[in-house]
Image (cartoon, grey):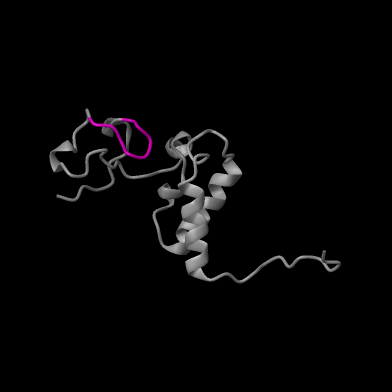
Amino acid sequence: MRDEPMPETVTIQLEDLRAIFDLAVNSLNFNSGFWTTEDVEIARRIAVIIGVDPMKGTPFLFASQYPHEWKSLRPDKPESYTPEFSCLYCGKPMSSHVLISRVV
């Protein structure tokens, strides 16, 4: 047990941080509804630090609270970029998203 106070910051290897992030977002709790807004904000900050899309650290229930591009549930089919298909991140149709750009 430590008698001195814990430091405000610590150094961690990027590889270790990526592993911890992967464990968190691939856990059964990730989309279970147990995460709080604070948990999501932390995961999104870590995603940026490790160089991945912050939406990968955003549970389904929180996805619509953050701006994101519409991503097809069927990326293997380019023709699925149509309003009747749902977004991979939030489950809403393309028509409910602001279209920023479209890669053809």
Which residue occupies the extreme right position in the image?
3
How many numbered marks, from 0 up? Answer: 0
**99 to the left or right of 46:** left
Whether residue 87 is in magenta: the answer is yes
Residue 97 picture location, percent across and down: 32, 36
Residue drawn 19% across the image and 50% down it: 103
Q: Out of 34 and 71, give the one closest to the viewer.
A: 34
**86 to the left or right of 46:** left
Whether residue 61 is in magenta: the answer is no
**28 to the left or right of 73:** right
**14 to the left or right of 39:** left
- The secondary structure that most of the magenta stretch takes on is loop
Which residues are drawn in magenta?
85-92
Q: Quadrant of the N terminus?
A: bottom right
Residue 56 picture location, percent across and down: 41, 49
Residue drawn 57% across the image and 36% down it: 34
Residue drawn 28% across the image and 46% down it: 100
Residue 30 picture location, percent across and down: 50, 41
Q: Out of 20 and 99, give the one closest to the viewer.
A: 20
Residue drawn 40% across the image and 58% down it: 52
Residue 37 picture location, percent across and down: 57, 41
